[in-house]
Image: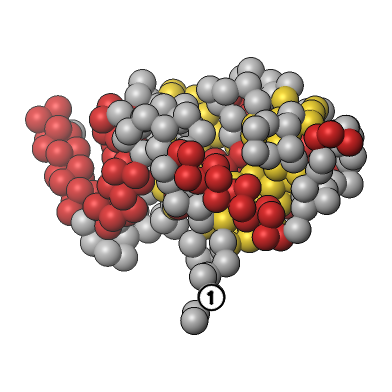
Amino acid sequence: MLDAEEGIPPVDSQESLARYILSKSHVRRQQGTLKPDAFVPHPHTDLSVTRHREASDDELWEAGQAVSDSRGKPLLGRGDVLAATYLRQKLKVVAKPISGNPNHADVSEWPSEKKLQKLIASEVSAVAKYVAVPEPEQE
Amino acid sequence: MPAVLNDFASRKLDECHRQLGKSAALGMDGVIRGELVEAYTDSNEEDWDGFGAQPVNFETLAQTKAFLRKLPLGMERPSIGAEPDGCLTLEWHKSRRRTLSISIDAEGNLTYAALLGPESLCGSVPFVDAIPESILRLLGRVYTC
């Protein structure tokens, strides 16, 4: 993970960003892809994501598990999207380290109209890669 | 035709539509009893998504049921979901760029976004007793283009 003491770099357009999925209705069961619903921030103004930068796969899942534990919802997976996808939609991606997750970032400057948010979320979900949470290893 | 016969024919047609709507092949009753109830149950409490979502309320469920029951018989079945502002969503998805998502709120407002090949469309229309023509046209385009 990024080291806050060394300074948190701004988000590069080629960075992958993970959106953790805690609701099964956000996943298309047959295709194993994500619905736009997973990327609509409304009524919030920002979409919470975690940067892949300098994070191992295990660390990414640990960050997701921490979100899951704090919200009391099971972690189902994550939606990986390049920062460039959000930037193309005229959104901003801002590094926002939080306690326990120096890789946290916010996708901000969403239009206030719901229909426009839905359209952007549709464009994002069309290119998002859904990664289901790994099954626990058998002993 | 006398008005009384017109009224009788209209009621009979509605009854036929309701009966056919219960069939597994043509109607949406299976979706209503299954996926819709499941989506509502999963999202009718505060913070159901873990990110502070508003709950889906009973009026939104009722509007969504009414919308599903008004869809033409034999229509492809949507996948049901919910959004953090408490709307229920219906999604018709053929491929990544052949997809329509409609949000329904407690007042029956429909907010939609569609990706149809290179085209991206969005808008809002009210649902009052019948499926708006604009929505039916979009639904047709998801599967026929």
Q: Give the percent coordinates (x, y) of residue A61.
A: 62, 55
Identity, as a three-letter code, of the amino acid under mark 1 = Glu
Q: How is the image coloured?
A: secondary structure
Q: Give the percent coordinates (x, y) of residue B30.
A: 27, 57
Residue at left offset 50%, top offset 52%:
A75
Local secondary structure at mark 1? loop
Quadrant containing the C terminus of chain B is bottom right
A48 sits to left or right of A11:
left
Residue at left offset 36%, top offset 21%:
B107
Label 1 is found on which chain of the structure?
A: A
Q: Give the percent coordinates (x, y) of residue A16.
A: 79, 49
**Residue A90 picture quarter:** top right
A42 sits to left or right of A9:
left
Residue at left offset 65%, top offset 26%:
A46
Q: Give the percent coordinates (x, y) of residue B114.
A: 62, 41
- Regarding residue B141, the answer to whether it shows in the image is no
**Residue B131 picture quarter:** top left
In terms of depth relative to the viewer, which is nearer, A138 or A107? A138
Q: Which residue is mark 1?
A: A137
B5 sits to left or right of B55:
left
B131 sits to left or right of A57:
left
Given the current orientation, which residue lies at the most extreme front position? A5
